[in-house]
Amino acid sequence: MRCYQVRFAFLSACSFFVGLSFANSALAVEPRAGGNEFPIKVVKVGGVELEVVVNSDTFSQATAINANGSIIGTREVIGEDISILSQKSFYFGELGHKDMPIPETFTNVEATGISDTELVIGYATRPAGHPKGNLDAVTWDPKTDEIVVLPRAEGDAACQAQSVSSNGRMITGYSTGPARMRPVVWTKESNAGGWNVTVLPTIHENNPYLMSSHLRVTPDGSCIAGCCTEAFLPSNVIDSSLYLWTKDQQGEWKRQDFSERQLYVKGFNNKRQIVGVARDSSGKSFPCLINEKGQETKLSLLPGDETGEARAINESGLIVGYSDDPHGPEGGPEPCSWSMDGKVTSVKLGPSPYGTIHAINDAGQMAGMATLVELNKAPGVENGLATERALAFRTKRTGR
C-alpha cells in the first residue's frame, strides 16, 4: 500500500543524542589540527580510525561527504545565555573548518549537500510573513565565502535545494507558490554564468511530499528521482509514487513511472539504485532499496530492532544507515550497512553499539554522529568528571 496521510512525523537524526561512547581508558585519542578553528580527535577503534570534529560543547553531526572526504553538517552553539542553543551549519574538509554564513536579510541557513568541487548547497530562511518570502535555496563557496540565492520558478514564493551533482553544476529541489509545490532543477552552464531554473513535469502541480522526501540527482547529473502526487484522496490522504526524470534527445526532461513505493529518498547512485525510508501499514519506518529496474527490497534490521533508515549508497552498492530498537528509554540507533541482497551488518565503531551513519563516498569513507566521552581530572581528585558530547565524525581514508 502506498497511500499515507501527509501529516506524519519523520524520524530525525537530531533526536538521537545517544551515540557511540569512546572512553579514553579504552581508546587512543590523538588531538590534531583540523582547520581554521576547531581540532579533530583521531579515535582508534581496532582497525578503524574515526576523525571526530570537536566543534560543539553539546552536539554536532555530519550529514554529507564528498569524494575528497569533505563533510558538511550541523552543530549546536551555546549562546551568552547558556539556556539558549542555536544551530549552525558547518563545512570541514579541504578548505578548513567554516560555518556557513547567513545571507543578508535572512535569519538562518542550513546546508543540505556538497559537491566534489566543494560547492555547498542549502536553504536560507526568514521569519514567516516577510515581504520577500521566508525560504530560498542557496549555494555557498567555502573558499570565497560567496553565497548565492537561487531563483524561484516563475510565480513562486519560495524554494529549497536538496541535492547536487558531483560537478556542482546541477541542483535539485522544489519551488512552491499558492497551492502548489513543484520539483525543479537548477543548472549552470559555465563558471561565469548564472543559475537557470526548470520545472520538472508532474501529474499535479501540488506535490507536498517533496518537502520531506527530497528530490535527488545522480552524481553524474543524468537522472533525477523523487516522489510526487498521483492523486488526492479523501481524508487528507495523498497517493504518491516514485518517479524518474531523464533528458530526451531534445534536451527536455521527461518523467517516467519507476516504483509505486512512497519513499523518503536518501541516496541515489549513477546506476540508478535508490535507497531511503518507507513506512509500513502500521506507520513504522523501514530501510528500503529500489534497484535500477524499479524492484523493491526491504532491507533487514539488526536482531531485536523495529525501525531503521538507509541513508546513502555508493557506486559499489554499499548501503549505510542505522537500525533502531523499539521505542523506549533503553537502547538507541546502531550504525549498520547492507549488501544489495538486503542483508544487514552491524558497523562496529566502538565499545558502545549506538550511533548513526548518514553518508558514504566511493572510497568507502563514512560520516555521521558519534558520542565522545572524556575524563577531566582535576588535581587531587581521585575520580575525574566525565563529559559527553555527541559529535560529527568521518572515517579516516587509508593513506590520508
Image (cartoon, grey):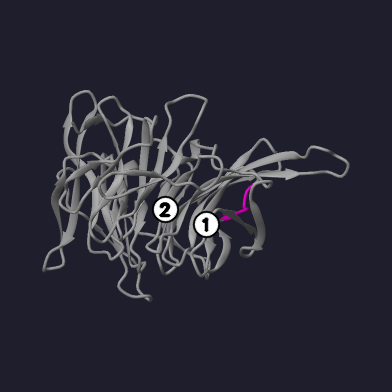
Seen in the image, is 41 located left or right of residue 50? Answer: right
Q: Where's residue 368, x and y in %?
A: 48, 49
* Residues drawn in magenta: 51-56
Magenta span includes 54:
yes
Residues at discs 2 and 1 in contact (Cβ within 8 Å): no
**Kind of residue sitting beneath label 1:** Gly
**Kind of residue sitting beneath label 2:** Ala
Residue 103 in view: no
Name the residue located 50 percent from the left edge and 37 percent from the top edge.
16
Q: How many marks?
A: 2
Q: Determine the CA span between mark 2 and mark 1.
A: 20 Å
- Say which element carries label 2: strand
- Say which element carries label 1: loop
Position of residue 9 relative to residue 265, above or below, is above
To which quarter of the image does residue 247 belong?
bottom left
Nearest to N terminus: mark 2 or mark 1 = 1
Q: Where's residue 91, x and y in %?
A: 52, 59
As drawn, the residue found furthest toward the right would be: 380
Position of residue 124 relative to residue 304, above or below, is below
Mark 2 neighbour density, 10 Å: few (under 14) some (14–19) many (20 or more): many
Residue that badge 1 annotates: 47
Residue that badge 2 annotates: 359
Q: Where's residue 277, x and y in %?
A: 31, 40
Position of residue 364 relative to residue 307, above or below, is below
Magenta span includes 343:
no
Disc number lying in front (2 or 1): 1
Q: Where's residue 289, x and y in %?
A: 26, 46
Mark 1 neighbour density, 10 Å: few (under 14) some (14–19) many (20 or more): few
